[in-house]
Image: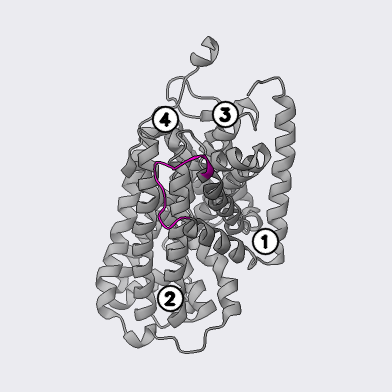
Amino acid sequence: MAEADSRPSLRRELGRWDLTAIGVNQVIGGSVFLVPASLAAALGGGWSWIAFIGAGIISLLIALCFAEASSRFQGTGGSYLFTRQVFGRFAGFEVGWMLWVTRVTSWSSVVNGLVDVLGYYWPAVTVGLARVALISGLVLTITAINVRGIRQSAWAVNAFTIGKLLPLAIFIFIGLHFISPSALAPDAPLDWSKVAASALLLIFAYGGYEVVPVPAGEAKDPVRAVPFAMVATILISGAVMCLVYISAVGIFPGLASSKTPLADAAALYLGATGALIMTTGAAVSMSGNNIGQALSGSRNLFALSEQGDLPRIFGHIHAKFRTPDFAIIFTSAIALALALSGSFATLAKTSALARLVVYSFTCASVLALRRSGRAPFTIPFGPVVPVLGLIASIGIAFGADALQRQTGLVALAFGAVLYVIARRSNAHVSL
């Protein structure tokens, strides 16, 4: 219709390396600076780095499924679009909704982590009005960057991605020279119950690559760029994080009990300068991650609205900047409220489980979509990779505890209510 054609549309300005930077920025966020201690405490240093590499391989299998499914679509939404076409509107909505829940709770968690990191040198910013002002200032600044345009957001993400990789590269390059091989050797029989309990932590550590297909509607050549970025994201992020983890395990005997594991490990061989480099790197990493959370989270809402599964206001596009302004502002407002109230802590427990819901549906979608013909990007070895990805995703989900399952079900139920409301309010819209 002429009326629909006159509406502003999103600009296609993202290249394959922009999408890769978005993915790397989301995977290498705050977890690389915090997970080593928790994982070492759960599995012991010798087994934990092996488990970390194993999780990277599983993540690559799932990322390949995202790459194949993405090559069939050019719109905004990622897994939401795959699931919607294969399993129907409601299942697609729930996957898209859980993608947004993951983004907004992760953003709330990471922005609080950033405040804690800055509090290492400036304790006053972690309490009272100073904390409120700092969190509000960070969220509002990120909101403004995202509203101004996808190009500005991509520049910021690219810059922060480079900024976070430099200190990690220093940590790896110098740390590998100080590794004690004996520290990498398993010192006890493997406890599979602990592996199962740690699996969600590992999924959280590698999580974030699922956002790469979400802004495909703003990519110059999404059919080629998204699959490239999916694979590149896991290969780059996996290599960096595995080398960081091996270095940390190999040089820092007190890793399991440290609250700032990389900073403490760097201090062993670089002194206070090393601790400062890693603390600064953590701050840069978390800041970039925050920008990426706002970018991808808002596009989830935009995609749901674009397909008529959320009220149309969420699909509003700024006439000048050509960005989904209402979706950005809404996502930012919820993230800010959760971060300031602290209630995000319970919701954050759904993050890894929500990702597994998305991963499972994506792997299953690949198998179903193949019935319609060969994809532009097709995974080799027939059904092996998507089947393994699906089994791994479902299997790891069984490691969730009761609270995680309960909060996950609450999130799904709340999404279902919103879906019913939106469908009734949009009943007059022909889709």
Report the residue that reaches farthest toward the top.
2
User: Would you say the residues marked 3 and 1 are in contact, meaning their CB atoms lie under 8 Å apart?
Assistant: no
> Is 11 situated above or below 89?
above
Among numbered discs 1 and 2, the one appearing first in the sequence: 2
Q: What residue type is labelled 2?
A: Ile
Q: Residues within 10 Å of mark 2 (few under 14, many from 20)?
A: some
Residue marked by disc 4: 148
* Viewer can see residue 108: yes
Q: Position of residue 123 (x, y in %)?
A: 48, 61
Who is closer to the viewer here, 287 or 386?
386
Q: Which amino acid does label 3 sit on?
A: Glu
Check residue 404 in the rendering and tell me which mark sits there, or answer none: 1
Q: Distance between the residues labelled 1 and 4?
A: 36 Å
Check residue 292 in the rendering and tell me which mark sits there, or answer none: none
User: Would you say the residues marked 4 and 2 are in contact, meaning their CB atoms lie under 8 Å apart?
Assistant: no
Who is closer to the viewer here, 16 or 311?
16
Find the magenta span and give its range: 371-382
Who is closer to the viewer here, 416 or 90?
90
Q: How crowded is mark 1: few (under 14 residues within 10 Å), some or many (20 or more)?
A: many
Secondary structure at badge 4 equals helix
